[in-house]
Image (cartoon, rainbow, N blue to C red):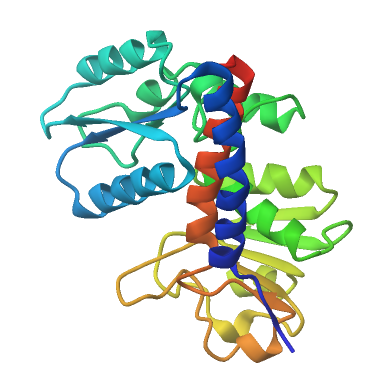
């Protein structure tokens, strides 16, 4: 029988623990931790995600500072806003909602975030430190996935993990985190030749390619652990889960698997940053 890797349930447990940690921070300093979110443009999905993150802050007793910039914002204008937040001692974490409008150099703006406030794990410096085993806040979605796998006792050591996707804030850090836990890691992507061959070898499969049901269930071997990091209209992920659930050792549902863990990781890392700064 397959294990359901229930991210929604685990996220609630994490939030319950964070309530106590936030309360202790308030008692110590008289102030609440603050996560600043920056939303550029009018993308409705991004606006929804920012709202969800603000709601999670409220549930654990944190505050959120919402910065809304218009569609025509330039790279320089966005960097100025980020620098203001870097210098604001009331703010412990900074989230720049992805994606930003095309005229903005997203990578330059990500890297303008102070490493100590990079609670979403998006800077090059943070990625490099994480990859080298140094202290840094990891990208929120991969951190959430690793927390979920650990909670359900999924053994990674020596296993073949296949990550389908190579984005700098999901696929690549996911691979590095799995490697750090002694998995043998293969990174694939939408242009990989004979992709189904690699997927068929996966003991641990992570779908992070950003295309609905791009990974077909028939490619996946029996007994694999399936992690679907995608979410698309119609409530489907990057993996065609129908037809493979009963054959898998474990799987993340869509929705209710990876998504809640991403937000829980972001909020948890903000609380960590607040504890490090002692507000």
Is residue 139 rendered to the left or right of residue 183?
left
Q: Quadrant of residue 252?
A: bottom right
Vertical relation: 263 (above or below) 102:
below
Q: Quadrant of residue 27?
A: top right
**Percent position (x, y) of residue 61?**
45, 39
Which of 136/125 is in front? 136
Residue at 49%, 58% in the rendered image: 260
Residue 276 in sight in this render: yes
Which of 146/165 is in front? 146
Q: Which quadrant holds the N terminus?
A: bottom right
**Percent position (x, y) of residue 244?**
61, 87
Residue 115 in sight in this render: no
Residue at 70%, 32% in the rendered image: 131
Q: Quadrant of residue 10?
A: bottom right
**Percent position (x, y) of residue 215?**
52, 74
Residue furthest top as drawn = 87
Vertical relation: 195 (above or below) 74:
below
Residue at 76%, 57% in the rendered image: 150
Vertical relation: 187 (above or below) 27:
below
Is residue 153 rendered to the left or right of residue 22?
right
Which of 100/197 is in front? 100
**Percent position (x, y) of residue 246?**
66, 91
């Amino acid at each position: 029988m397959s294990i359901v890797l229930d991210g929604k349930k685990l996220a609630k447990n994490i939030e319950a623990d964070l309530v106590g940690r936030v309360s202790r921070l308030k008692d110590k300093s008289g102030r609440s931790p603050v996560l600043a979110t920056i939303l550029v443009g009018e993308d409705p999905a991004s606006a929804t995600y920012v709202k969800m993150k603000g709601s999670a802050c409220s549930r654990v007793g944190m505050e959120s500072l919402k910065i809304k910039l218009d569609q025509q914002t330039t790279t320089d204008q966005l960097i100025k806003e980020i620098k203001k937040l870097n210098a604001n001692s009331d703010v412990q974490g900074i989230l720049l909602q992805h994606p930003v409008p095309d005229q903005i150099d997203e990578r330059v703006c990500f890297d303008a975030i102070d490493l100590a406030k990079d609670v979403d794990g998006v800077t090059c410096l943070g990625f490099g430190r994480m990859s080298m085993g140094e202290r840094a806040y990891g990208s929120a979605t991969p951190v959430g996935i690793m927390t979920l796998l650990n909670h359900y006792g999924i053994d990674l050591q020596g296993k073949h993990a296949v990550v389908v996707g190579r984005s700098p804030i999901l696929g690549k850090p996911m691979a590095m985190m799995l490697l750090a836990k002694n998995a043998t890691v293969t990174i694939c992507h939408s242009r990989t030749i004979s992709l189904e061959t690699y997927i068929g070898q996966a003991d641990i499969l992570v779908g992070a390619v950003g295309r609905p049901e791009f990974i077909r269930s028939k490619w996946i071997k029996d007994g694999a652990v399936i992690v679907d990091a995608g979410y698309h209209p119609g409530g489907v992920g990057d993996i065609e889960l129908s037809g493979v659930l009963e054959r898998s050792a474990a799987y993340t549902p869509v929705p209710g698997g990876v998504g809640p863990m991403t937000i829980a990781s972001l909020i948890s890392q903000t609380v960590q940053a607040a504890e490090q700064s002692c507000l």
